[in-house]
Amino acid sequence: MKTNSKNKILIVDDHLLFSQSLELLIKSFGDYEVIERFENGKVFIDYIEENSSTEIDLILLDVNMPVLDGLSTMKWLKDYRPDLKVIALSVNDDEEIIIKMITNGAKGYLLKDTSPEIFKEAIECVIEKGFYFTELVSGMLINKVNSSDKKINLKEKEIVFIKHACTEMTYKEIASEMCLSPKTIDGYRESLFDKLEIKTRIGLVLYAIKHKIVFV
């Protein structure tokens, strides 16, 4: 945590009441200040381009917005400002959306009904450590990938599968790409879930990021 100034946060969300309430919550934490709020990705990007020297510690980015949504905004940030740390915010716990946001550079993903305590923990963790992997998604904590540093030996085909699983491809498309049957791919998936002690494709993506199998 900074000792001489507050951490600077931007909010990008089209729901005015939510973004105002979020700003008040952040201010109540004491160590943070919201320097700007934006109603969509386009006005946010315009601001970033015009204020490239502005110090920004964290961006809270809504996934579903008009004009330019969170995913498109995240892709722009990955290409032009990968140094900026982002936590995605959404009412949607869809696995596909979560994977897309994380693989395009989001450092965390929080549901909008997250408790203030978890929200505070998330922003602290992302600012200080770079990632927040313990967010509540689909009713379960997916911090298993961040709780163990034991060495796990992966086969070459398993690593290839993991890399493909971190893309937007379906399991059927991965099978075609790897010239394997869908049944064999299902076997890889279940074997890796068991070996890595994870339960979802999201967990697989987070494991890949943490262990530098893929880079975001």
Image: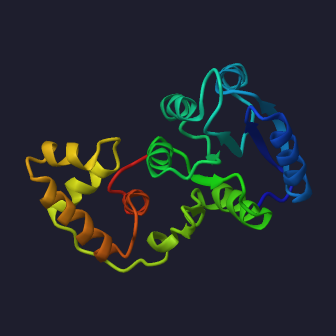
88 left or right of 101? right
Q: How is the image coloured?
A: rainbow
Percent position of residue 197, x then y: 37, 76
Residue displayed at 66% across by 62% down = 125
Percent position of residue 111, x then y: 65, 54
Q: Quadrant of the N terminus?
A: bottom right
Task: Compare residues 149 and 96 and report the one nearer the observer.
Answer: 96
Percent position of residue 202, x then y: 43, 58
Task: Please tell me whether residue 136 is drawn above or below residue 214 in the rendered image.
Answer: below
Residue displayed at 9% across by 52% down = 180
Number of labelled discs?
0
Percent position of residue 201, x then y: 38, 58
Task: Please tell me whether residue 77 is drawn above or below residue 160 in the rendered image.
Answer: above
Task: Compare residues 112 and 145 and report the one nearer the observer.
Answer: 112
Picture quadrant of residue 3: bottom right
Residue displayed at 66% across by 40% down = 61
Picture quadrant of residue 12: top right
Task: Please tell me whether residue 108 is drawn above or below residue 136 in the rendered image.
Answer: above
Residue displayed at 37% across by 61% down = 204
1 left or right of 28? left
27 left or right of 134? right
Task: Compare residues 4 and 120 and report the one nearer the observer.
Answer: 120
